[in-house]
Image: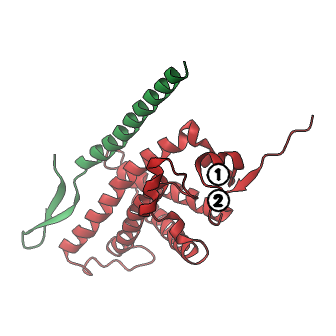
Chain colours: A green, B red
């Protein structure tokens, strides 16, 4: 997976053009991971709360 | 039987709610116009992108001025004392997660706005005569890098922010951002009463 996008200036030297768009999937994946982990944590908390109430 | 009126407490003033939703709408337009072409949906995105960017920049400048001179700025700044929330202490107007979310948004939006305004010189808009020679290619690349990182951080933050905003137990916060108020019972359930800061 690329981290950066590169180009060349008029003298052929490599210059940074920006972030590689491969990282877009990483950003979406990180957001989805936080959501899934919190949803699992929340579901476990609810279940154990119900069990304590029994 | 007469119903008792809800004991409403104002949490967000109208102008602050307007700022929030203008920010939300412009962020959706900015991310849509910049990222949809990357995933293959081609359209003329540049004009829509910079117009939404200018609107967002004006909104955040006004928000910074209002927060600095008309509100209590420190109410939203994370402090070591906020760690007491881990041992059950109730927060003031904003909890530590809310403060951290605001801090992350501040980083993303300010970075995107500052670099975006500079990149407008390269793109050419009614505000700036197009001049790609103001900076070297390396500097333009670095500004684009920061702009891109702000966009990626914003994608992450939008997902997390919308998820937490839609949770049933957080519904009172969503309502307060739409209508301005929460009930005193909702306030007392999550916050220290009487330390809301200015609405």
Q: Are marks 2 and 1 on the same chain?
A: yes
A36 shown above or below A30: above
Q: Is residue A1 left or right of residue A12?
A: right
**Residue picked out by circle 1:** B176
Q: Would residue B106 be visible to someone looking at this image?
A: yes
Q: Residues within 10 Å of mark 1 (few under 14, many from 20)?
A: some
Q: Quadrant of the C terminus of chain B?
A: bottom right
Find residue B120 and report its horizontal and vertical position in percent.
37, 72
Q: Chain of mark 2?
A: B
Quarter-of-image position of residue B18: bottom right
Q: Secondary structure at mark 1?
A: helix
B59 and B9: which is toward the camera: B9
Q: Which mark is residue B113?
A: none
Which residue lies at the image location 16% right of the left edge and 50% below the top edge? Answer: A2
Left or right relative to B73: residue B130: left
Q: What subunit carries mark 1?
A: B
Q: Which residue is mark 2?
A: B12
- Label 2 with label 1: CB-CB less than 8 Å: yes
**Residue visible at 77% across and 49% down in the picture:** B7
């Amino acid at each position: 997976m690329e981290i950066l996008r590169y180009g060349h200036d008029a003298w052929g030297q490599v210059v940074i053009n920006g972030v590689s768009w491969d990282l877009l999937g990483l950003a979406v994946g990180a957001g989805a991971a936080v959501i899934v982990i919190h949803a699992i944590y929340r579901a476990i908390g609810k279940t154990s709360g119900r069990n304590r109430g029994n | 039987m007469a119903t008792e009126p809800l004991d409403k407490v104002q949490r967000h003033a109208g102008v602050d709610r307007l700022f929030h939703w203008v920010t939300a709408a412009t962020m959706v337009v900015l991310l849509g116009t910049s990222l949809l072409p990357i995933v293959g949906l081609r359209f003329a995105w540049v004009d829509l992108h910079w117009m939404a960017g200018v609107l967002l920049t004006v909104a955040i400048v006004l928000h910074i001025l209002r927060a600095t001179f008309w509100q209590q700025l420190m109410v939203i700044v994370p402090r070591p004392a906020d760690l007491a929330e881990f041992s059950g202490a109730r927060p003031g107007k904003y909890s530590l997660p809310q403060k951290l979310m605001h801090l992350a948004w501040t980083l993303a939006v300010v970075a995107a706005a500052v670099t975006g305004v500079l990149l407008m010189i390269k793109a050419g808009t009614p505000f700036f005569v197009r001049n790609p020679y103001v900076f070297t290619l390396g500097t333009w690349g670095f500004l684009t890098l920061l702009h891109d990182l702000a966009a990626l951080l914003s994608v992450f933050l939008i997902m997390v922010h919308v998820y937490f905003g839609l949770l049933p137990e957080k519904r009172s916060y969503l309502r307060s951002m739409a209508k301005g108020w929460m009930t005193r019972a909702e306030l007392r359930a999550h916050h220290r009463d009487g330390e809301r800061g200015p609405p």
